[in-house]
Image (cartoon, grey):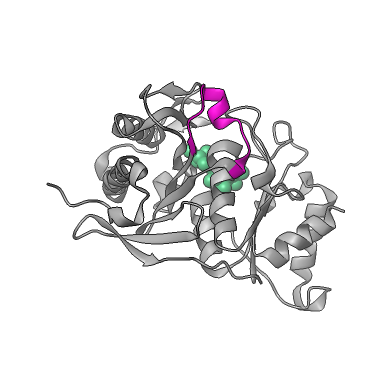
Amino acid sequence: MPMPAIDPSLIPEDMRPMIHALCATSIRLSGIIARGPLAGKLGAGVGENSDGDQQKALDVMADEMFEAALKGTGVKYYASEEQEEVLTLDDGGRYALATDPLDGSSNIDVNVTIGTIFSIFEAADDASASFLRPARDQICAGYIAYGPQTLMAITFGSGTMLFVLEPETGEFVPVEKAMKLPEAAKEFSINASNRRHWTQPVLAYVEENERGKDGSKGKDMNFRWVGSLVAETHRILTRGGTFLYPSDARQGYENGRLRMVYEVAPMAFLVEQAGGKATDGVKPIMDLTAEELHERRPFVFGSSEEVDRIAELHG
Ligand code: AHG
Ligand code: MN
Ligand code: MN
């Protein structure tokens, strides 16, 4: 018997095979990522996904690994950033799982943290009804970060737990039973190269942060941008801060960049369960419903004081 990749007593019984498959696959993936160029040309362009984003070799590899591993684990419907349509993996399965199998693709070749994001619902009668529903209906969400440590944050709706991979045993070891996202922030994250395209409230928030101690904020704010949502979310869950990927004036960015079903909704669930807030600028993400599988949604999350301030600036 191989060691379980995670202590089963921490996982609701029916979900154990599925969560175990996610863990075991991410452990294999972390081994490949750690070898970088020794494992092949992981960051090579191999095509485009349904949304016109370039697919890298590792995007496709990760998707194929999760799809294969989740068969026979209770997953009825499998939706992935890398596949246009939802797949039926197991007609009798109880769950619908959506994933960004590899987040932060632009960082693959530069040895910067990348990740996997997943969101789980109870499966409904058909694929659309399973995923196109309020984010509040999620029963589990999580991410795995492949960084200096491989770690996993996961929620089943009663707090956000954190596990770190012990490479010696191949097990995710619990390190936090309930993560607590600090209410106040000292850092903010936004892709500042888009400044000229921002809306007025976003610009006002960033300028307030830049004025720091000398402005109405009364404190200095640091700026950070990794370019991997998983890395950004993990930093903010750990020590507070804000993240913004707002809508902007560029064509195709009317709803920002991040995808509602497998990026925004699961991160919002994890953040809320850790005491932070997540909105589209104004409305809580958890109250919103996706209309299309690959749709984008403006995303603001982090320390509650800051997320409230951003909503206030939106009037
Ligand atoms: P993906 O690699 O799955 O396409 O996601 C990339 C996302 C996210 O991780 C990150 O926050 C954002 O795109 C970066 O966008 P910019 O390139 O506009 O900075
Ligand atoms: Mn992504
Ligand atoms: Mn991706």
Residue 24 spot, x, y in % from top left:
27, 45
Q: Is residue 104 left or right of residue 58?
A: right
Residue 201 spot, x, y in % from top left:
82, 53
Q: Pick whichever, 30 or 15, lies toward us.
A: 15
Q: Is residue 129 highlighted in magenta?
A: yes
Q: How many marks?
A: 0
Q: Is residue 150 highlighted in magenta?
A: no
Whether residue 199 is situated above or below residue 309 in the rendered picture: above
User: For residue 265, what is the image quadrant?
Assistant: top right
Residue 109 spot, x, y in % from top left:
40, 45
Residue 243 in sight here? no
Residue at 59% in and 67% down: 240
Q: Pick whichever, 190 or 260, lies toward us.
A: 260
Residue at 68% in and 40% down: 288
Whether residue 63 is situated above or below residue 25 in the rendered picture: above
Magenta-highlighted residues: 121-136
Q: Pick whichever, 110 or 182, lies toward us.
A: 182
Residue at 56% in and 51% down: 269
